[in-house]
Structure formats: C-alpha cells, structure tokens
Image: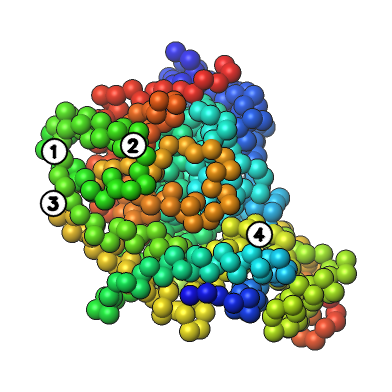
Amino acid sequence: MALSRQDVAKVGLLARLALSSDDLDRMTGELTKIVGFVSQLEELDTTAVAPLAHPLDTQNVFRDDVPAPSLTTAEALQSSPRHDGSCFLVPAVLGDSGAA
Amino acid sequence: MQLLELSAVDLVTAIRQGDITAVQVAERFLDRIEKLNGPINAFLNVDREGALSRAADIDARRKAGKPLGPLAGLPIAVKDALCTADQPTTCASKMLAGFRPPYDADVVSRLRQADAVIVGKTNMDEFAMGGSNENSAFGPVKNPWDFTRAPGGSSGGSAACVAADMAPVAIGSDTGGSIRQPAGLCGITGLKPTYGRVSRRGLVAFASSLDQIGPMTRSAADAALVMETIAGHDRGDATSLADAVPRYTSMLEQPLTGLRIGRVAEHFGPGLDSEVARGVEEAFAAFKAAGATIHDVELPHAKYGITTYYLVAPCEASSNLARYDGAHYGHRAEPGRGHRAETGRGHQAASSGEFESPLVEMYCRSRAEGFGPEVKRRIMLGTYALSSGYYDAYYAKALRVRRLIRQDYLDAFQSVDLIGGPVSPTAAFPLGEKTSDPLAMYLVDMYTVGTNLAGIGGISFPCGFTKGGLPIGFQLQGPALSEPLLLRATDRYQQLTDWHRRRPKLPA
C-alpha cells in the first residue's frame, strides 16, 4: 500500500524525528517500497498461530529484591548535554518559552 | 613463526610460559593497527596507553608468580556497540559521538577479569543497522582483501581487524547476521551464540529479542577459548541463560563420524552467486569426507525470513532508540539558530502542524541531527508498523510468522544435527554498490536472519576463494545451546583445510 506524505509526517512526529520537506519526499517513496515488500507476509494464513516475541521457552525468573549500589548522581549526569549538578535540564515541557 | 599470525590459543600459552611478554604482544599489534588503520578504518578508537599499561601489569604479575586469567595478555578489539567505561562508545553514530558510558558491558568486565588486553573499539554500521559498514557516521571500513569492497556489516570493523592481523580476536554482535556475514566476507570465523548464552548488558540495544554478542576469530579453536570467558549467566540481563558454560576448548577433537548435516535446497536458489555455490558444495564434500552425512531438509518458511526480520527488528529498534532524547546523554540540538522558522516550514508543509512544546521540538531536532539515514528509515518503519491501526497487520503478523520459522528449525533438527549452507549470496561486493537501494542491502542477510528469529546458534567460516581472490563463507546453524557442536564441526573442518590460514596481501 502507498503511504501518503501526511502519513509519513505523522509517523515522523510519533517517532520524534524532525523531517524536512526533502526528507518527507524521499521517505514517502522509500517507506512505500519497504512496506510493500514486507506485505509479502499477507499471503500466509496465520490465524491459528500464536505470536512469538521471545525465541526461547524461558519462564519468568524471580529473585529477591535486595538493595544494591547503583549509579551515583554524578555518574548518571556525566554525559548529559545540560544539567545543574542534580537534575537534567530540558526546555519547557508545556507552552512555548523557558528553553533551558 | 610471525607473532602476528599466532593463534589466540598459542599467544596465551606463549605469554603464560614466558616465551614472550604481554607488552611485546600488545606493542606488535598496536604498531600494526597504527600502520593499517588509516586505509582500513577498522578502529574508531585505539587505546594504546591503556593497553600497554594493562599488558605491563600482567607481565609484572606473572613475574611475581601471581595467578593470571585465562586470556592473560591476549589483545582483543571490541565492537563500538559495547560499553567501555574507559573508552568512548559511539555505536558509529553522531548521536553518541564522544559518549563515555558510566559502566562496562558484562562481556567487557569478563574480558578484563580474564586479563585480556582491550586494544580499541571497532567501526560498525550505525547502531548495528547495515550489512556493509557504509552506514557508519565515521566512514566505511575497507575489506582487507580488496580495499574497494565492503567488509560486510554490521561488525565490519571487527571482521576487518582480525582479517588484517590488527588483532587476533574481536568481539562482535549479531542481530540478523552481523557477526557471520562480515566474518564470511573477510575470511574469518564468527560465532553467533544461542540467544541468551552471552549477556547483553551494556550492549547498545538494537533489537533486544534478536541481539547476541559473539567472538570473531581466525579459527573455531580461538572462538572456543573466548567463549569460555564471555558466556554465562548475568543477573543484569534477565534473558541471559543460567545453563552451565561448557569447556568448549576440550570438546573440539571428537571426530565427525555420524554427524548429520542438513542441506536446504532453497539456499541454492536464485540470487546465489555460482562461485559461492561451488565453494559451499566443496565444503559439504569435505564434511562428508570427514565422516558426516548430508541430508536434504526443508525450512518451508525461510523465504519469509527477511520480511519477518525487517518488521520485528525495526519495531524493536524504534522502541529501543526512543531513549536518545537529547536530555540524558548523546547529541542535543542547539537552541536558536533560527530553528523555529526552519522546522516550522519543513514540518508544516505536510503535517498537522508545530511541535507540541519546546521539549518536543528539542527531541525531534536532536534526533534528526544525530541519526543517519538508515537508522531513521528503520525507526520510521518500526514506528509505522507499531502505530495504531497497523500493529496487527504488521508487527503481530511478523511475530506469528516468526513462530513458524522457529518451528521449521525445531522440526529440521529432529532429523539432522546441524544445517549447512552459504553465509551470504555473494562474496564481498564493491563499496557503493547497494547504498542507494535499501532493499538490495537487506537481502544480504537472507541466509542469516533465520538463526536470530529462532534464537539458535550459528557459525561462519571460510570455505574457499573466488577467482578474484575473495573469501567465500560457509554457515552452520545448530539447535539452541549447540555451541560445542558448532565449534567442534568447524574445528574439525579447519584441521582438514587451510582456508582459514590464508591472509590478504598487506604491507608487512
């Protein structure tokens, strides 16, 4: 099936990827081709087959919840593009101002 | 014998016996890297100082009669998808340029514990997405057998550095063939262990139900040695297996008499290069001569492997890569620079409108700047296939077919012990040949993705050369936890042949 430019723009926003006008043009073509390719699976009847998300027959594994050392604040922040020593800094979550 | 050509097994023995020092070994390989990395581009980071200081420490401990780990003094190159606290970890992406992880991957900790000497981090396709290494943000790796050709991918730097004697051992990761395919195209041995055999903690996640770390070496015996260190249960990876780790190195010598190897007719269908087919048939003949029997088996859903893979993997990737948000670590777009008008124009042209908030704008612009084209393509495909209204048609459908593919293998392994065949449809292809056609690039994984979808083990190793002098790879696939058999069958083959000893002609 063909994807529209609007479809691709919507997916771009869901995927949190800013797409330029050129990106949208190129990706609309590429994704239409790839989606057409993967649609090959439609020819298989899988109504009686359960989905398989994990390849091995392992069950949930439980262990005791024992406190253990974790990353320090400094380690967690060491690669952050912006922080104040105790918190990550980001632009405004609501509204249109207060960029950090 | 040339130090550079010693096997990992022999290097470790020579260092332990004091025939040679760990510093001498490290220096020799580091000099080789210095000489060849310019043209080959296999390493993104070389830690000369760190490697030499670890080697000196090992020599001092040996002299003092203190105990040494099983890999003491062995130089190892690590794919840049594994976290190293003392070296940058970039996944060959601008998104992670200069990123220094706060901890070591479990495999890296185990290597250090075993006294291996990590010499550097190897180039790869960005976030392990690709089959040629051309998706690296830091330039492609060149195939040591022909610098105009791709080394394969995504673990192309790891494969090339072993093929070029820049390291005797490298660590790779394999989500759809990323260890086995570059190993095949570079003429080395690459093992993708059973899913869960090796901990994934600290491996930058691509597709978590498919990813697996494994050794890339010159021989099965060397791979067995490395597996004894890196395999095993890890509390930090809920999917890692608790099964005891076998002594792989002591299980290699039993003859192959009575071994049943399956051959899948579809592997020899359209798309397979005739020279590759010939090399693979000769390997079957060699296995037969070694006492194995060859049997036709069917994998009826194998032809759906690529399509299933290219839904499952991008879906998982779109979720995994959501963590790159410009806030916690990684690239963040600079505010300002007139971006409002710029992004507004680009987006409003076709979409519902502006970003919801400055935060969302920062996310979208950071990710647009940080990720390369193939990574964006897969995130978009995965996001689309998981989105409301399409989930059942694409993602859930692919998971159902995944069960059929796995069942094919379970059925086949009722009548054979291993399945043999080609690793890739062609030998190493020219750089640039497939870069403009994503679908053509996806097909290079056609023989390898089934292993990952089924969660089983696979190994690839050289079984001949084309007339043009390029290595041809042979693949063996085996049931879950069949690593001892995969390694033994490969080792027995390598005792009878010398393809794995051939080296590309490079400056000494």
Instruction: Pick whichever of labels 2 and 3 is earlier in the sequence.
Output: 2
Horizontal and vertical percent position of residue B292: 15, 36
Label 1 chain ID = B
Horizontal and vertical percent position of residue B109: 51, 47
**Quarter of the image where the N terminus of chain B is located:** top left
What residue is at 49 percent from the left and 39 percent from the top? B429
Q: State the CA–CA distance, disc 2 to disc 3.
A: 28 Å
**Side of B297 relative to B220 (left or right):** left
Residues at marks 4 and 3 on the same chain: yes
Residue type pointed to by label 4: Phe
Q: Report which residue position mark 2 lands on.
A: B274
Residue B255 seen from this side: no
Residues at marks 2 and 1 on the same chain: yes
Instruction: Pick whichever of labels 2 and 4 is earlier in the sequence.
Output: 2
Crowding near pointer 1: few (<14 within 10 Å), some, many (20+)? some
Q: Report which residue position mark 3 lands on.
A: B415
Residue type pointed to by label 2: Ser
Label 3 chain ID = B
Q: Secondary structure at mark 2?
A: helix
Quarter of the figure with residue A52: bottom left
Label 4 chain ID = B
Residue type pointed to by label 3: Ser
**Side of B183 relative to A8 (left or right):** left
